[in-house]
Image (cartoon, rainbow, N blue to C red):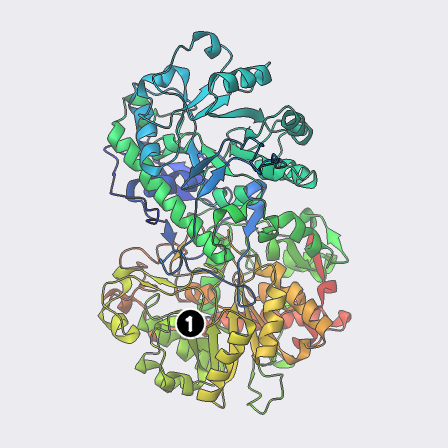
Amino acid sequence: MPRYHIHTRPAPAPFEYPARFQMDETDSYVKYGHRVFPGTSQRGDRYWTAEIISQTWYQAETGRIPISGAGYGGPFSGEGFEGMWLDMSEIVRPTRDGIHGREYISTTVNLGGAPELLEFDAAAHLLTPMPKSMSLPLPVMFGPLPMPLPGRGALRALTLAAERLGTLAILTSDALDVAPSRNLALRLAADDFDSIGDLAQAPVYVEIEDEPWALERWRAARERWANAMVVLRHALGPDSPTEVERLLRQGVRFFHLYADDEGRDRAGRPLPDSLREVHTHLVQRRWRDSLSFLVSGGIAAAEHVPKIIACGADVVVLDYVPIIAWGCALWADKLTCPVEKRELDAEWGAQRLVNLMAAWRDQLLEAMGAMGMREVRRLRGEVGRVIFEETESKAFRRLFPTTAPLSAWRRLPEEDSGEGDMRWTHALVASSHQQARDGRPDFEQEFRVGGSGGGFDRLAFAFELTDAWQQTWQRSRGDRWLADPAGFDMSLPLNRRGDGRPRLVIPLPWYGAGMSFGSIGLPVMLSRARAAQALDTFFSTGEGGYPDDLIPYADHIITQVATGLFGVREETIQRARLVEIKYAQGAKPGLGGHLLGNKNTESVAQEREAVQGTSLFSPFPFHSVYSVEDHKKHVDWLKQINPRALISVKVSTPTDVDMVAVGSYFAGAHIVHLDGAYGGTGAAPEIAKKNIAMPIEYAIPKVHRFLEGEGIRDQLTIMASGGIRTAYDVAKAIALGADGCIIGTAELVAIGCTRLGSCEKGLGCPFGITTTDPERSKLVNVKGAWRGIVNLYTSWLWQLAGILRALAPYGVNSIRELRGRTDVLVYLE
């Protein structure tokens, strides 16, 4: 049987989109530059954000997965879909590599539950009537359009797209003139039973509208169309578990459970929470496998599909998404969307939907590959493969003996600007630039936290809430809260195993993260190398190889061995004092690396031993590592090649990250590098950023406490990355249980990054940072850039010393004594 494939082709819009968008750190996005009302600025809808709308346009036009650089810049979490992270597999569980075709992952779903029991006659003939069933190659259907559009083109586009995708487009009775030649799907209201006549073809799917006496019409529809799957619509609400059970006892087996257009049930609860309640209730009654749930209402983005299936859906039904795909901006209410002005070209509209579903399916494959799942059917109701922010947040808050209102914490005012995002606010970007110039913070602007609303941004040190601290900010601009780092032990031992390999101590509790040649250019690599040398610390090559220009700095360079093995040679491993095995990256966990073809220049291709101009994908996982035993062989291999090197294991943050860490200890690693979901990246699929694996703040204490319980905490060095932006973040990460941190984006900000997020586009960063173009790379002056990194880190050391001095009354006098001291932190409610 041939594999399911969706055929895409470009379908550009024959008009200008009704709005352009930009990020704003105080909200999701703002819309600006209306075509009709130039100069106006309106905030976008908080649910159907500009990000969702603009990415839907891109996917419908190209059929490609949205990819961007610079990591995630949105809020820490939110309600519903925004409070869910998909889990992933790593080392201790089997993994899949389906997106690049190495393994087949099925997106086929079957509608039609199993019978409750089987009865046979004396001759062993089955007496139990088998329920109606239907197979769809992807778990998506199109619902009736939620708003009328001119002509019949939009309706024809829906049915054409459904036919090409092998799924269904549900039509209302007034759209029968555009009915497909086969696989007719209908939604019928009360009036339709009196007005609808004989149909040219028998429907395969009939959906009964959620109205009074719907159960009677459902029975009538079953009699009239005996071979059809007859579905009952039901609005989700607090009574849904018992109401669905009541209807099930009346014989209903197919339900279309729906929420409103912002994904809320009748009581205002988020769709995922409401659906989970129904699903769990029926699982406990042991009836769930007898039913099929179609779910709609607020399904707006590709990541919503695996999340809602994990909450209990069999299939999602799309309503507003097709209209957006055709060029509508929904809440651009001062403009009429192009799709509302004139009749849609059906062929063009169908191709836009086919392209969009191809991109959504690829993202579903990426998510399932990260989770190690072969079939989407197995994902249904697998809440154990989802990390819920509400659950993790409760466990996280219990770590802190003290809480305080957010209003008790003094935040410095911020200048409004287009720079930055919710994690790297304008103030953080500007203050980091200033520290890179002067080597000290400017107390006129916020330099400690961002505006994400969670994680490190909701933690404060207890001394920050004291009257003395508040008065110092007001009277002396905070200078007294800096201290000379020479008076404090800031050193970090990297080998705690006592295994005969070098002890290797660095004088500050952080070093530079991996950034590959290709994601950044050679001047940036040299700048980072010179800074590491000046500070007597390290920086990692990333997975793009080890250019010869770095050899003079070999004692301060970590050789990274990633899944693609690009540029990895024995001599580069033997050259290093520290070798890093990259199993995963927090910004794109479970997906491997990704270098777009336009950045694979001649020099990059030569270093990576690849063909110039081709996109380079690293697999996930290492195809030689599928267990802790395989992992140990990997570590042993590197130790054999370089008898003096320490081994670091870079992993992401799945729900069982504690088991990954203990497995790495028994594999012989010296360092476990935890990379959280909010880190930077040169290029990552949007579905990976924020949607897969947990934030670093939740992973650190989980690993720290588990290793303490196993009695091996002091034999491993735990390093944290993926959202560490400031000296205060470093101190908070250590107080949560890390030994030190690994820094990436902050170094680029020190060089001049303004968080434009265009790292992967064209030639890359306009400032020459994330580019491999020979000419544009010259914009980075190595001499000035490395000093900027040193200055930023010097400022951090003075701040860190000030933190330690303020914590002296708590018995904390060195950076090592701060480890695991959650009692010195306050959670800001």
Decide: is 226 above or below 500: above
Decide: is 797 above or below 745: below
Decide: is 746 above or below 159: below
> Residue 358's spot in the image, x, y percent?
35, 44
Q: Can the viewer see residue 814 in this picture?
A: no
Give the residue at mark 1: 562
Quadrant in the picture for residue 337: top left
> Residue 755's spot in the image, x, y percent?
41, 56
Amino acid type indicated by mark 1: Ala
Q: Nearer the viewer, residue 163 or 747?
A: 163
Q: Nearer the viewer, residue 21 or 659?
A: 659
Q: Secondary structure at mark 1?
A: strand
- The number of discs equals 1
Q: Nearer the viewer, residue 252 or 671?
A: 252
> Residue 25's spot in the image, x, y percent?
49, 46
Q: Can the viewer see residue 350 in this picture?
A: yes
Quadrant in the picture for residue 310: top right
Q: Residue at x 40, y 79 (%)?
A: 530
